[in-house]
Amino acid sequence: MFLVKAGAALAVSLLFSSAAYAADTVAHEATDLSVNWTGGYVGVHAGYGWGTVLDVNNPNATEQDIDGGFGGIQAGYNHQFSNNVVLGVEADVSLGNVSGAFDGRTISVYNGYYTEDEITALGTLRARLGYSAGRFLPFVTGGLAWANVDHMLGCDRARVVGAPLPPTGCATKFETSKSDIAVGWTVGAGAEYALTDKWSLKGEYLYTDLGKNRVMLVDANFPGNPVNNRNFDMQFSAVKLGLNYRF
């Protein structure tokens, strides 16, 4: 019995000693990692965006929803101060399909018209301000944003099923498109977690306003219409997950 009790006591002692050692090791690693945010990094990310676009020059246009996924790469540099404040800069670029469409299959003078607005590429150049809390780095961020946006306008009465043909409007079938670069601003917040002394996982939310972007989409049915000089107002939110390698 004595040997059993002694063995049990030794096992419990070893268990608590191992747990204490593991806790001390984790705490020590966290302390070490808290000073390792200084330096450059590169990484990859994937995300999902959603927002709205409105042709403000067209009095008959309605606000359309856009959404979709994207993915890309990022690179940046952080500097950690002695008070654990971390100041950094980051640039990223993504490819994706954040888009929305209008299909005018309604009984009106404009039925047969359809549109699509699509963000095919986007990027940012942002400052980051954070605070190192061991393995965690919460931060706020903001800066310049840009996007390559494709706008399409078309008209085809054959698309309208079961509706009477309007006397005006979509008389000539056509489809036209224009791509342009829209530039605006972005703000957001996120957090980064150091998996090791080199690798870190991050998540962030960004709100982006691309402002008003003028493009010419000529309507073949109304070629001289001043609203052919369209003015798209676009903004969207995005959530991203990323993986960084620090060097």
Image (cartoon, helix red, strand yellow):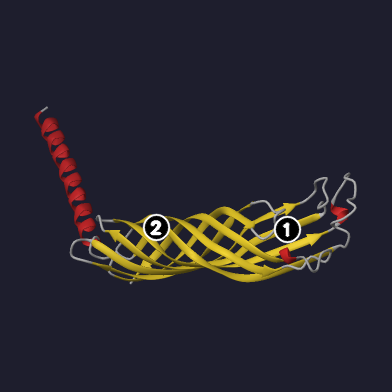
Residue at point 20% right, 53% down?
A: 27
Q: How far from the left and from the top, in percent, is residue 202?
A: 39, 57
Q: Indicate the amino acid at tag 2.
A: Lys
Q: Residues within 10 Å of mark 1 (few under 14, many from 20)?
A: some
Using the rendered view, name the quadrant where residue 210 is placed. bottom right
Does 57 sit left or right of 208 as displayed? right
* Label 2 vs 1, first from the N-terminus: 1
Residue at point 54% right, 57% down?
A: 235
For the C terminus, the quadrant is bottom left
Outermost residue toward the left in this view? 2
Secondary structure type for disc 2: strand
Q: Nearer the viewer, residue 75 or 198?
A: 75
Residue at point 83% right, 45% down?
A: 107
Using the rendered view, name the quadrant where residue 142 is placed. bottom left
Does 15 sit left or right of 146 as displayed? left
The residue beneath circle 1 is: 115
**Closer mark to the observer between disc 2 and disc 1:** 1
Residue 4 disc label: none
Q: How far from the left and from the top, in percent, is residue 70?
A: 56, 60
Disc 2 and disc 1 in contact, CB within 8 angstroms: no
Using the rendered view, name the quadrant where residue 40 is placed. bottom left
For the N terminus, the quadrant is top left
Q: Indicate the amino acid at tag 1.
A: Thr
> What is the C-alpha distance between the residues marked 2 and 1?
36 Å
Secondary structure type for disc 1: strand
Q: How many numbered discs?
A: 2
Does 72 sit left or right of 98 as displayed? left
The residue beneath circle 2 is: 202
Q: How far from the left and from the top, in percent, is residue 69?
A: 57, 57
